[in-house]
Image (tube, rainbow, N blue to C red):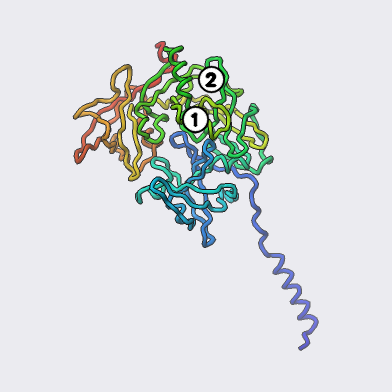
Amino acid sequence: MRFPATVLVLFFVVSALAQEVRPAPTPVPTSVTIPITVDHNRILIDIDLPLPDGSTQRVRGWVDNGNPELTLSRHAATLLGLSITCSEEACSAPPPPSLIVHGMKILLSEIKVAKIPLRAVDASSVMAPGIPAEINLPSTVLRHYDVLINFPNHELTLAQTGTLKFTGTRNKVLVNAENGLIQIPGQIDNKKYNLALDLGASISFLSETIFEKLAAAHPGWPHMRGAIGPANLWGLTEEPQSKLMRVDRVPYGTLFLTGVPFVAFSAERLSFFEKRAGVPTAGLIGSQALLNYRIGIDYAHSAVYFEIGRTFNFPDFDVVGLTLRPEDNGRFTILGIGDYEGKPSVPLGPQGVEPGDRLVAVNDIPTTGSTMGQVWSMLGGTPGQERRVTIERGDKRFEVTAIVQRFLNDAQDQKK
């Protein structure tokens, strides 16, 4: 069959127009800047999980440059269709090939295994009790990007290597080529040490050996026993006996940090961290000491940039002196009571607080299902303020009036 010439011309014109109006493919971003939430000094962001059916599921993620291991909640692993295997102590699965952060694909090709916590059903939607995250971004993944953590502006920038222009003072650092863990030269009491940069840790840690030497040499430096506030990380069994001290001055790379709270690292735990770091280390500087800074990490050139963004004094230790453990079911158990000036900081006994009690509410605000950061915000305040804490012991509930105290007073406070 023959078609008139005009019909053929019209056909080609329509075809050309159809091709012209096709939408252009969406460009894949090489850099993204996204908001962060800081909860218990931990950095949380939104992450999209690519699911087997082609859709995505948004979950909360924890940016943890001080940990090389990928961890997923059981809920996230199930959504991703991962094959989970378990022993009596832990579960694991092959990792997904990638994640998506604000449209930017984050490859996980170098991760060999994802850890899946062995949790009860009630806690299946979090990777660990007390932190509202289902997945972490570990150092093994972050080291393939330029990273800027802007605490003052509550922002995180991830960029393809070499595309981010860093500002601030440049520090030459040691980066483990296998896992991306960072060590920065520092000084404590005029002695040189390597201290890790661990923005996934809510507090700083120091070798117990060095800690004890400093405590003996400087009895006037504020110190205490009992993990409270940002030192109360996970509610580990040893936390009620944790030793804390505020170190007067800590040169850290080009920074000069003052009044840094440290928790003593046991020899066993320090050995574990030192083995992962691959070099001798005396401890780590956590996010609590750096909340006023913009921190740029140039993994490709083994450099870290620090830029001051504000000079706010965070009153992290103006709190009620309890040591807590977040449970798998979303509740909080009281593990211990911190001392204040040699006396228990919270009333003890049958009508007070005892280890093993459960913290049900603070000023009538329920704590069940809250994060560690949220509960410690409830327990914080101005020294001298009262907090009504609701305690559950067995099948009984009662209230105790607790006072907000200023723990680890700095040198200026001690002179008053």
**Pick the front one: 242 or 257:** 242
For label 2, the residue is 250
Distance between the Cα atoms at labels 1 and 2?
Answer: 22 Å
> Residue at the location (44% across, 37% down)?
39
Where's the N terminus, which quadrant?
Answer: bottom right
Q: Nearer the viewer, residue 391 or 9?
A: 391
Give x and y (percent) for residue 211. 46, 20
Q: Residue 251 appears in which quarter of the rendering?
A: top right
Mark 1 packing: few (<14 Cα in 10 Å), some, or many (20+)? Answer: some
Q: Earlier in the sequence, mark 1 or mark 2?
A: 2
Task: Give coordinates of residue 144: x percent, y percent.
Answer: 62, 42
- Badge 2 element: strand
Query: What is the residue that sits farthest to the right in this orientation?
Result: 5
Q: Amino acid at mark 2?
A: Val
Query: Residue drawn at (46%, 52%), measured in percent from left and top?
Result: 76
Q: Secondary structure at mark 1?
A: helix
Work out whether 304 lies above or below 95. above
Query: Which quadrant: the C terminus?
Result: top left
Q: Is residue 25 above or below residue 17?
A: above
Among the 4 quarters of the image, the one containing residue 401: top left
Residue position for label 1? 271
Image coordinates for residue 111, horizontal then vertical, percent = 56, 47
Q: Is residue 324 left or right of residue 65?
A: left
Closer to viewer: mark 1 or mark 2: 1
Task: Please state which of residues 22 and 281 is positioned toward the viewer in this rendering.
Answer: 281
Which amino acid, by three-letter code, is at mark 1?
Ser
Q: Say the numbered circle drawn on residue 207.
A: none
